[in-house]
Image: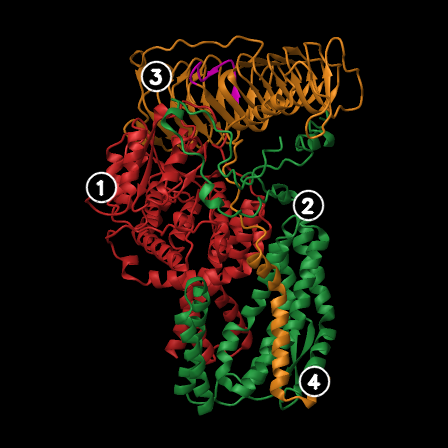
Chain colours: A green, B red, C orange
């Protein structure tokens, strides 16, 4: 301990956390937490700001890339029209977002029949999927309800529909651009605040931005093709379920992966993952049954762990 | 036009409600990660331990009750201060036989309470059983819970603070690796206890007494009027009454106890529907009282109490938000795509807002269980099922009308039914 | 590949496949964890060391017995390969500035050289009187243990008999003894547990306990009844000198128990508690703020503070009625006597005067 500061020296602090086998003794998970430090400011403000600015700078080449993709696959997909441009003002900057100018028609009788068929399949799946697949069944039922709303709308309401296909596609892509600019901040406030290494933080943002940058034009093209071929009847389902929701789903997936990375920080200190549950362990998790004669007026503390079959070897004292 | 206006107002209302709960999740997680951990009682290891009665309500629990009683018998609480009272409430399986067998083997320590009539349900059973025993402190364990050796002392320790009316420990799922559902429930439980409950404890809000792995001070229970036998969620009901009467409810993050989580989706749906109905009942009864008593309680505690009571109404709000979103989408109002996008983003919350994922991931990270966080995207499915089930339960009559349980509400047990060799 | 030669539907199928594949990529870790679980066991709940301060000492005793460290012939190595060194009057370990990483067995009462640093466990088979400035990672004394001035315990120390710590000792981690712990001034500590824990330098002042009837009965004013003999007071509460409060009380302000008063139940204050000289509290004391127990007082139950506890020459608990003093910061003055455990989560210290 330093006699000047009253704090334990680094060597003593290290020895205090060291087990007799040389491993690091972790505090109990109920006691652990993170410390606020100035690096949080970097993680929460500087890093996402750098990424957002970089994204702004890269937007033009990215839009050029999207345009090139659209130009390349528009004709092979049989999408009529041209690749048009929508100028979006983002503060002092303006971004030229490309989109398809293909139109989509009001659903025909055949489209409606197809829609009913889709609903029928979804309902059938929703009703028949049980047991472990029940949540998938619930998803099918929810999709059926959404498609049903579209069927009813296009059956009862007079044309025109509130949105045209070009409006829809350009809106989807503009929304994607906004998400690309905001994503670094979302990552900062949900991932950077943990004790990951700098490269891990940079890697997570890069992964997300990279994935979205490629996914968004493909997603828009798929939506455009389906709506163009299948009429406006397909738009509600695509918008409500397979639009922005899908972008967030991507982040949740990447986030779940990233949060499983070993950081070497404080929270890794409590990494005491026990081995995978062995077969039959569940039946033997309880302590041996006491016999009446084994009980004393004050039962002495038991040394053995309650989960002996699945617990790790004794504590690293 | 009026429908559109109503949908617009409804949607913004939903967005505001969701935003409040999202901020709550986020704030709790930040507090748990960076705030000072408040665990003032966890170090009480020596004391003149008070007389304790442990109640184990059981209704057709022959598959699991032995494990629970065995674990309780080997706890290190002074034997001359401990009475274990397993309650059999009109079981039709072997539960009663098992309890009588234990009572014969441990006559000084196990004193079963057998019920054949009266109001069914846990609260009524506890009310009757507690009237027959006079331990200063009463702990309650469901029959599928397996307490550790030192758990009883840990749960009794907070009662040395005379302001503490109830204590809650941490529930840890035992049957984690059996299915997607059990793995998702494990993640949810981690978020709920490691982060949510502990943050509430840190911030002196309203940690919730959960009806098991916890206990109550007899004096406090008597002062607030005892167990509410016509409640479907006696734990929430009691939590709010204690807070309203000036008692503290304490959460002990270190006091961990294994439980068996539902293994089938059907069982899970029944469980969450039951919770939703009971919670909503409590909301109907006490939200007004909480707001009226706002001068006697810290504002932040009133706010947290109201939000806690409203937690099972949120799925209903989410569903309403969906309906409004869809309505506005078709109506083309507002015509701006950006606004519709905002609606879409908010409606994304229908299957769980991101703050919930953040909370769960933070909790598992704190638990040192890194790799199970990879299951996070599957939580979408769990949230979808919960949202639809709770939404449906919240629309039911039982959610809002006074009424006592007509039958035992319990979760199906699987422990002994598993074929040999399967984990 | 020339896409224009394929039909639009086929091209779309290719595009859709590419999109689905791209969407599936982030899901791969989740799918792998679902199909081939790596982290699907229940948490290793219910830590066995929780609430048992002698857990590590017990584990080491068990290991020492198994490895033959308590026998007549000490093995040169443990079964895991760790080196064992013995120290005795006839074969002493010589003074060295380098830390000793081996497990050290003290065969007799011969003290180690001053300022020795032991990075392995140390087993003292007989009563030992440690030299000044010795650093022990972990020390198990089979009899009494006396730690010399400015010694340091890094993880734990347990004495099967008495444990004494001289001035300037740092007891980091757990310090336990089967019989008693005696601390000199300026000893820092984290967690202590023994039949009785005393701070030397002054005898504890015993307050005579009279029957409750001998006191003037006191009932708090402006209070809300929380039950029979159970009150909640809004604001501060002062229990007058020589009065008896029969029951338990909660105050949303501070509580001061004046000289010679008696409380038969427990107390809780949202701010501070000050128990003045010569008072008796039969139950426990809990406060969000500081708790001060002045000389000559006696508290029977646990003392719990969320900030700081100061105990002067007072008695907490009783022989056969062990209790706990717990707070982030604990200060003990000469004569302070605690039967049971003292837990200072952040910093515990004995001080010569206030």
Task: Give the vertical position of B6 relative to A224 (above or below).
Answer: above
Neighbor class of circle 2 (other Cα within 10 Å; few <14, some 14-19, many 20+) is few
Q: Tell me the number on the disc at residue B115.
A: 1
- Residue under label 2, please give it: A264
- Asked whether the residues under marks 4 and 1 belong to the same chain, the reply is no
- Residue under label 3, please give it: C243
- The residue lying at 70 percent from left, 76 percent from top is A63
Provide the residue span drawn in magenta. C310-321
Residue B207 within the segment the image draws in magenta: no
- Residue under label 4, please give it: A71
Q: In front of the other: label 4 or label 1?
A: 1
Neighbor class of circle 3 (other Cα within 10 Å; few <14, some 14-19, many 20+) is many
Neighbor class of circle 1 (other Cα within 10 Å; few <14, some 14-19, many 20+) is some
**Is most of the magenta stretch helix, strand or loop?**
loop
The span from disc 4 to disc 1 (Cα, nearest Å) is 77 Å
Q: In front of the other: label 4 or label 3?
A: 4
- Asked whether the residues under marks 1 and 3 belong to the same chain, the reply is no
Mark 3 chain: C
Residues at marks 2 and 1 touching, judged by CB atoms closer than 8 Å: no
Neighbor class of circle 4 (other Cα within 10 Å; few <14, some 14-19, many 20+) is some
């Amino acid at each position: 301990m330093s006699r000047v500061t009253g704090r334990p020296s680094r060597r003593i602090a290290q020895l205090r956390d060291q087990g007799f086998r040389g491993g690091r003794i972790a505090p109990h998970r109920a006691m652990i937490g993170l410390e606020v430090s100035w690096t949080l400011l970097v993680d929460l403000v500087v890093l996402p700001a750098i990424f957002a600015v970089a994204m702004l700078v890269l937007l033009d080449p990215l839009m050029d890339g999207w345009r090139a993709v659209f130009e390349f696959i528009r004709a092979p997909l049989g999408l009529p029209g041209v690749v048009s441009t929508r100028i979006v003002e983002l503060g002092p900057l303006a971004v030229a977002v490309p989109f398809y100018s293909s139109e989509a028609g009001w659903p025909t009788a055949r489209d409606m029949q197809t829609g009913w068929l889709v609903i029928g399949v979804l309902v059938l799946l929703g009703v028949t999927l049980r047991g472990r697949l029940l949540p998938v069944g619930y998803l099918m039922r929810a999709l059926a309800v959404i498609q049903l709303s579209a069927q009813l709308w296009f059956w009862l309401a007079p044309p025109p529909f509130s949105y045209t296909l070009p409006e829809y596609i350009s809106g989807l892509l503009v929304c994607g651009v906004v998400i690309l600019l905001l994503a670094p901040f979302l990552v900062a406030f949900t991932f950077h605040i943990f004790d990951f290494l700098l490269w891990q933080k940079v890697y997570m943002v890069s992964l997300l931005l990279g994935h979205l940058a490629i996914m968004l034009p493909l997603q828009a093209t798929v939506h455009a093709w389906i709506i163009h071929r299948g009429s406006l009847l397909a738009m509600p389902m695509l918008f409500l379920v397979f639009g922005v929701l899908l972008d967030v789903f991507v982040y949740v997936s990447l986030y779940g992966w990233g949060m499983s990375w070993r950081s070497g920080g404080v929270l890794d200190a409590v990494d005491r993952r026990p081995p995978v549950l062995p077969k039959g362990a569940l039946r033997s998790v309880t302590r041996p049954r006491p016999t009446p004669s084994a009980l004393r007026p004050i039962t002495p503390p038991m040394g053995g762990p309650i989960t002996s079959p699945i617990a790790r070897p004794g504590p690293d004292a | 036009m009026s429908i559109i206006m109503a949908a617009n107002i409804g949607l913004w209302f939903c967005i505001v409600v969701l935003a409040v709960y999202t901020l709550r999740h986020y704030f709790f997680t930040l507090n748990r990660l960076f705030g000072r951990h408040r665990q003032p009682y966890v170090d009480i290891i020596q004391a003149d331990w008070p007389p304790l009665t442990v109640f184990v309500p059981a209704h057709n629990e022959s598959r699991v009750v032995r494990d629970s009683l065995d674990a309780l018998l080997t706890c290190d609480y002074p034997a001359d201060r401990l009475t274990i009272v397993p309650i059999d409430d009109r079981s039709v399986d072997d539960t009663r036989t098992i309890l009588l067998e234990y009572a014969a083997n441990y006559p000084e320590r196990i004193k079963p309470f057998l019920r054949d009539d009266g109001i069914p349900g846990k609260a009524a059973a506890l009310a009757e059983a507690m009237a027959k025993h006079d331990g200063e402190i009463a702990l309650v364990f469901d029959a599928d819970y397996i307490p550790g050796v030192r758990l009883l002392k840990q749960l009794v320790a907070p009662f040395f603070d005379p302001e503490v009316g109830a204590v809650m420990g941490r529930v840890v799922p035992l049957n984690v690796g059996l299915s997607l559902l059990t793995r998702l429930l494990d993640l949810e439980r981690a978020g709920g206890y490691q982060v949510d409950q502990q943050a509430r404890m840190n911030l002196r809000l309203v940690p919730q007494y959960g009806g098991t792995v916890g206990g109550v001070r007899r004096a406090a229970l008597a002062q607030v009027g005892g167990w509410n036998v016509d409640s479907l969620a006696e734990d929430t009901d009691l939590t709010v009454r204690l807070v309203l009467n000036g008692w503290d409810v304490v959460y002990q993050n270190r006091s961990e106890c294994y439980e068996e989580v539902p293994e089938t989706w059907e069982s899970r749906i029944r469980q969450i529907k039951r919770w939703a109905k009971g919670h909503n009942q409590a909301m109907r009864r006490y939200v007004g009282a909480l707001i009226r008593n706002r001068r006697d309680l810290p504002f932040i505690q009133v706010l947290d109490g109201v939000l806690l009571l409203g937690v099972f109404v949120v799925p209903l709000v989410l569903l309403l938000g969906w309906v409004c979103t869809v309505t506005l989408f078709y109506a083309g109002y507002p015509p701006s795509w950006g606004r519709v996008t905002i609606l879409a983003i908010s409606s994304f919350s229908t299957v769980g807002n991101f703050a919930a994922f953040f909370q769960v991931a933070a909790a598992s990270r704190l638990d040192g269980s890194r790799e199970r966080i990879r299951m996070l995207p599957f939580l979408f499915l769990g949230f979808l099922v919960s949202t639809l089930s709770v939404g449906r339960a919240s629309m039911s009559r039982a959610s809002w009308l006074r009424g006592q349980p007509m039958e035992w509400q319990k979760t199906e047990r699987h422990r002994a039914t598993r074929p040999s060799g399967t984990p | 590949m020339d896409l224009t030669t394929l039909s639009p539907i086929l091209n779309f199928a290719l595009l859709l496949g590419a999109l689905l594949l791209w969407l599936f990529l982030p899901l791969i870790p989740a799918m792998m964890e679902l199909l081939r679980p790596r982290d699907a066991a229940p948490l290793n709940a219910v830590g066995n060391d929780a609430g048992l301060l002698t857990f590590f000492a017990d584990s080491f005793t068990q290991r020492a017995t198994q490895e033959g460290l308590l026998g007549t012939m000490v093995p040169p190595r443990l079964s895991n390969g760790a080196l064992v060194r013995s120290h005795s009057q006839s074969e002493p370990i010589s003074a060295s500035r380098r830390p000793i990483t081996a497990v050290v067995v003290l065969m007799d009462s011969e003290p180690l050289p001053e300022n020795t640093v032991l990075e392995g466990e140390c087993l003292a088979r007989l009563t030992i009187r440690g030299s000044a400035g010795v650093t022990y990672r972990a020390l198990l004394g089979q009899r009494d243990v006396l730690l010399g001035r400015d010694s340091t315990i890094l993880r734990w120390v347990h004495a099967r008999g008495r444990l004494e710590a001289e001035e300037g000792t740092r007891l980091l981690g757990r310090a336990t003894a089967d019989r008693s712990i005696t601390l000199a001034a300026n000893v820092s500590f984290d967690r202590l547990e023994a039949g009785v824990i005393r701070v030397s330098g002054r005898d504890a002042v015993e307050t005579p306990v009279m029957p409750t009837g001998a006191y003037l009965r006191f009932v708090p004013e402006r209070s809300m009844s929380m039950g029979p003999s159970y009150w909640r007071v809004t604001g501060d509460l002062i229990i007058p000198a020589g009065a008896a409060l029969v029951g338990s009380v909660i105050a949303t302000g501070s509580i001061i128990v004046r000289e010679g008063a008696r409380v038969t139940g427990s107390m809780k204050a949202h701010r501070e508690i000050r128990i003045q000289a010569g008072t008796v509290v039969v139950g426990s004391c809990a406060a969000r703020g500081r708790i001060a127990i002045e000389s000559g007082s006696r508290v029977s139950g646990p003392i719990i503070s969320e900030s700081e506890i100061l105990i002067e020459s007072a008695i907490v608990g009783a022989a056969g009625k062990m209790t706990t003093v717990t707070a982030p910061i604990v200060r003990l003055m000469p004569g302070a006597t605690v039967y049971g455990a003292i837990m200072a989560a952040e910093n515990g210290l004995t001080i010569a005067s206030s």
